Image (cartoon, coloured by chain):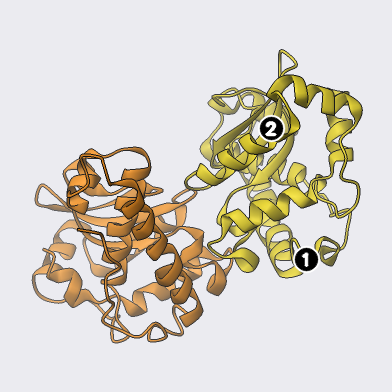
Chain colours: A orange, B yellow
């Protein structure tokens, strides 16, 4: 079955002013869609023809890995966001963040620094690594599943994610990004 | 202290291939910030006072921040220098070297485009002169450069095409292919030829 672009539970303009409609139209409508299309063009006739994205992430290399992982990463990113997001997590997620980072603000600071210092294109991730929450950086299409970690939350720091709205000011994008994080959706991944 | 090299042209000179917004963000904001960061990273260290070339040649033993920013400054200097809406023909010497290194101008162009379009992530494409004198096209990730001792392909870069999204995003968005076409139209073959003959 062909891979498809997921539907988003919000309008493309709903994340304004943090992320503009224009950015969403290109990021979701062009980049994410292109990864889906590329993947559908690459897998026929390979052992990944009927594979899940997770299998592709764990086992593929080259173009199939890059496009498959980018489809997964973008879906995961867009589904972590909400126009009614922001604030702080509650419940078990809040407790685990406190246990492993000391406080939500300490977590936020470390995560932001990780996202800001990632060199080039890539993603910063909050993961569950053998029961402990950690923050990791991945370049390009990298995904922590490949290292046996469970992804909980991510920020896309490819320039296409923020250049129209923030130009070269990546730290401003990261700071504003916290206003649209859907912590309820993130907590469901625990 | 490293200083930004001013553009030899006004930003609208490169229209319609590159527009003023894309260029002024690229040169005025991005490149300027690499210069600032490089100056900050070498301040008070043994690296202060070294030229960009000296820094690149020993990249393997330098801190990441210096490797990245020295690479970025060198690459952007070369990138902006080799853009024009004027002269478009390589010298007879450079044409001859392209023919003997790639087989023909068409084969060179094909390699240039296919490497630029298949590269994934942030990096640069170079036309370079290997130390044997042969020309080749290579892509390197991040802000790496063929002068660096860590580069998998080493030699003198003659031409650099920025493949980071910031180089084309305001004008071309996701369409890297359109940017590569535009860049091809802007190459200052007269300056590239001079550089080829100089090294």
Residue B21 location, quadrant: bottom right
Query: Does the image show residue A145?
Result: yes
Query: Does the image show residue B135?
Result: no
**Residue shown at 62% from the left, 27% from the top:** B148
Residue most extreme to the top: B132
Q: Which residue is mark 1?
A: B16
Across and down, in percent, residue A182 comes to: 25, 77
**Residue shown at 22% from the left, 47% from the top:** A49
Across and down, in percent, residue B174 comes to: 53, 62
The total of numbered circles placed on residues is: 2
SS state under label 2: helix
Across and down, in percent, residue A58 comes to: 20, 42
Q: Earlier in the sequence, mark 2 or mark 1?
A: 1
Q: Which residue is mark 2?
A: B108
Across and down, in percent, residue A53 comes to: 22, 53
Q: Is residue B34 above or below residue B169?
A: above
- Name the image quarter holding the N terminus of chain A: bottom left
**Residue shown at 35% from the left, 51% from the top:** A41
Q: Is residue B72 left or right of residue B152?
A: right
**On what subunit does the disc labeled 2 rest?**
B
Can you tell which of label 2 and label 1 is closer to the viewer?
A: 2
Residue A75 location, quadrant: bottom left
């Amino acid at each position: 079955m062909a891979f498809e672009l997921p539907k988003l539970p919000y309008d493309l303009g709903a994340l304004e002013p943090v992320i503009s409609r224009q950015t969403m139209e290109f990021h979701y409508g062009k980049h994410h869609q292109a990864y889906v299309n590329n993947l559908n063009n690459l897998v026929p006739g390979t052992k990944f023809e009927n594979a899940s994205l997770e299998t592709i992430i764990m086992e593929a290399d080259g173009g199939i890995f890059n496009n498959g992982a980018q489809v997964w990463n973008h879906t995961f990113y867009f589904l972590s966001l909400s126009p009614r997001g922001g604030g702080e997590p509650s419940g078990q997620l809040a407790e685990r963040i406190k246990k492993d980072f000391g406080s939500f603000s300490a977590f936020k600071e470390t995560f932001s620094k990780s996202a800001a210092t990632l060199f080039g294109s890539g993603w910063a991730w909050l993961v569950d690594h053998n029961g402990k929450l950690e923050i990791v950086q991945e370049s390009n299409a990298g995904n922590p599943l490949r290292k046996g970690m469970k992804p909980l939350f991510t920020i896309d720091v490819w320039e296409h994610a923020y250049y129209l709205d923030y130009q070269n000011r990546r730290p401003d994008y990261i700071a504003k990004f916290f206003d649209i994080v859907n912590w309820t959706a993130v907590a469901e991944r625990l | 202290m490293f200083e930004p090299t001013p553009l030899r042209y006004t930003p609208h000179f490169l229209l319609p291939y590159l527009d003023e917004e894309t260029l002024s963000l690229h040169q005025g904001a991005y490149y300027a910030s690499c210069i600032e960061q490089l100056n900050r990273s070498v301040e008070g260290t043994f690296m202060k006072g070294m030229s960009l070339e000296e820094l690149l040649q020993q990249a393997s033993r330098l801190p990441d921040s210096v490797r990245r920013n020295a690479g970025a400054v060198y690459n952007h200097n070369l990138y902006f220098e080799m853009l024009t809406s004027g002269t478009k023909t390589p010298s007879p010497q450079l044409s001859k070297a392209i023919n003997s290194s790639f087989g023909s101008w068409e084969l060179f162009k094909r390699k240039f485009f296919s490497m630029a379009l298949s590269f994934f992530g942030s990096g640069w494409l170079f036309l370079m002169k290997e130390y044997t004198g042969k020309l080749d096209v290579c892509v390197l990730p991040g802000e790496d450069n063929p002068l660096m001792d860590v580069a998998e392909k080493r030699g003198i870069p003659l031409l650099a095409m920025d493949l980071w999204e910031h180089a084309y995003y305001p004008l071309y968005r996701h369409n890297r292919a359109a940017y590569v076409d535009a860049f091809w139209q802007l190459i200052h073959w007269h300056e590239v030829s001079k550089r080829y003959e100089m090294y």
